[in-house]
Amino acid sequence: MMTEILEPVSRTAPSQQAVLEVKDLDVDIRTPKGTVRVVSKVGFSARSGKTLALLGESGCGKSMTAKAIAGLLDPVASVAGGSAHLESHDLFSMTAKQRRSVAGEGLGIVFQDALAALNPVYTIGTQLGEAFRIHRGASKKQAKVEAIELMRRVGIPEPETRVNSYPHQFSGGMRQRILIAMAVALSPKLLIADEPTTALDVTVQAQIMQLLRSLRTEEQMAVVLITHDLAVVAEEADDVCVMYAGNVVEQGSVETVFNRPTHPYTKGLLSSVPADAHRGSSLTSIPGSPPELNKIPTGCVYQDRCPLASAICREQRPELRPTGPAQSAACHFAEQVSALDPQSEPATGQESER
Amino acid sequence: MSIQTQNQSVDSVLDVQNLTKTFHVASGSSGTRELKALDGINLNVKRGETLGLVGESGCGKSTLARTLMMLEQPDGGTVRFDGQDPFALRGKQLRAWRRRVQMVFQDPFASLNARMTAGQIITEPFATHKDLYPTSAARKQRLDELLELVGLRTTDAQKSPQEFSGGQRQRIGIARALALGPDLIILDEPVSALDLSVQAQVLNLLNDLQQQLGVSYIFISHDLSVVRHVTDRVAVMYLGRIIETGSTQQVFDSPLHPYTASLMSASPKLDPALRPVNRIVLQGELPSPLDPPSGCRFRTRCWKAESICSVERPESRVREPDGKIVLGMPTLGPSAEQQIAECHFPVQSAAEAGLAVSA
């Protein structure tokens, strides 16, 4: 099945069918000062052969969401509510053993820090072959053959000799390729990529994104791409969930959300990107900084930084509601967002972060 | 304050010629090998301008920054700061010089001492440079001035770094760099650790400060959209050499060097209209600086490489005002504005590299 580099794997699922369905996900972290909700009522679905981006700044809960789905939450964190279905599997009601059987063939994950994600005392061949030994009952010899094949598939030169190397003997880009190889070893239906290119240089980033794209197409995987980079989302993703302070504030197809944002935060983010503007002109910035997770205000999570905030925003948290075809936003004043002119924002936008 | 020499252009703050720095790296039992981190760097920074320095990790950006900060001793070449060679200075003169070049670091969480208050951090340079603000009243006044300059409250001086957000911490780092009134600040990835919404605030602050104070920046960053926004000129580094320089607009819109063109092509763009028609995805990664390729050092990854590239080091080519690309040596003075690249087969136009041609 994995002998030909470009051999497409036949899949029965049509491309529109949701591989992953997450509903009302809540994640809590226990701290000495009490329980903090870091992910609140998050819901989305990922389709086969498509990329869904979870977009947000640090601390917005995007990685927590992914870890909850993958069953990799730290012991201090726990799923407090909601559901996640990977096809017919209810991920949150499974035993640890059942979960392990889903890992690999159902779900693969690529982490940001490849050096930390690989075991320094085992060769790459051993680590890549593990999946085949555990899930497919392959012998050591078979597993090594599979590992070499995988390395070839993700573009690692001289796989026959490199298979016996240790993680530290590879460059950052090559390590990221190895992690991707490991995640796609058993052709999972869902691939979660958590900031897969953040630590990499731009030329290597382009290589890795190209690899992920071609693997997605070959395998018809559903990809959940976690990132803070709007340009990467614009280029790689089909759908996007914009997260802020543990909540999804806007979601929809990338094209609609980026062309016509209906949440003030999305709009603010898009205009903070240094564009082709002339030098010397001020960038539009969002005043302030995201709230600390133990101090999330009642009402709208974005109220403190929002140019549209009014009394209702302080009292009532807006629910996600449709704001256009294939688009929804959690804002009381979503209809007014498109009229928000970034040039007129400086009334609040020029205030420095205090 | 400025000391001019006769052969120095008036508006130049920093002038670097043929700077080299070699490290000796232990290698097995056979002794050491040479790592040429800087291999003949020419650089010029004018008063009040921002020079961008881009390149992949391992290309020598940080070694260059450290050498300009006099944290490394170069093996060859000349550095002229306002006409003076800082490496020839000793004692009091050297100490006086050091206040003129300051640095802002990438990680605002690691670069501030958690046991000191913001006020102590910002005023710490005055302990070395005692003559600048001799009385505690003068230091306090300067502290308040600096805090206000970077958009913090005067009451923030009492807080410790961990009470601030990332963007505010970077403001403290900037205030510390400004404390001694430098002529040049080296900004080493100053916003890459910050969230996008906060990044814009800090970039705006840096721009405002430059307008107010006339300070020059060397802006090191891997984020090309940021570099494009904040810099006047750009220098592109590859394996210890600057392979292309020019005005930001020239270098971004019509790069001469194939490596520069690949960088522009590879960087993700938010606006679909700016995306390359055909993205150049370079094969392979930066070769080891211990064993750089012969001839042109980019040839192993270059899409235009021919046999001559492995034999001969390319000479500089300059884009003439009429658009023609000719063999030539970079000359100082007004022609430093010219776009220069070291390549046998420079890219003739943005269209050749498949880059979107901006209006």
Image: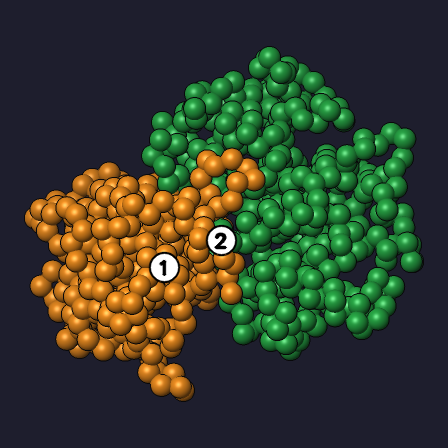
Chain colours: A orange, B green
Work out whether disc 2 and disc 1 sit on a shared chain: yes
Q: Note whether A118 is above or below A161 in the view shown.
A: below
Q: Which residue is mark 1?
A: A306
Query: Disc 2 and disc 1: Cα gap in Å?
Result: 13 Å
Q: Amino acid at mark 1?
A: Cys
The structure residue drawn at horizontal position 9% and vertical position 63%, both measured from the top left corner, is A88
Q: Nearer the viewer, residue B354 or B5?
A: B5
Chain holding disc 1: A
Q: Amino acid at mark 2?
A: Gln
Q: Position of residue A18 (x, y in %)?
A: 13, 54
Q: Position of residue A318 (x, y in %)?
A: 22, 65
Q: Nearer the viewer, residue B32 or A91?
A: A91
The answer to which of marks 2 and 1 sits earlier in the sequence is 1
**Callout 2: few (<14), some (14-19), or many (20+) C-alpha neighbours within 10 Å?**
some
Q: Nearer the viewer, residue B223 or A179?
A: B223
The structure residue drawn at horizontal position 28% and vertical position 46%, both measured from the top left corner, is A338
**Callout 1: few (<14), some (14-19), or many (20+) C-alpha neighbours within 10 Å?**
many
Q: Which mark is residue A350?
A: 2
The structure residue drawn at horizontal position 56% and vertical position 40%, both measured from the top left corner, is A280
SS under mark 2: loop
Q: Is residue B328 visible?
A: yes
Q: Is residue A40 visible?
A: no
Q: Is residue A19 left or right of residue B205?
A: left
Q: Note whether A351 is above or below B308 in the view shown.
A: below
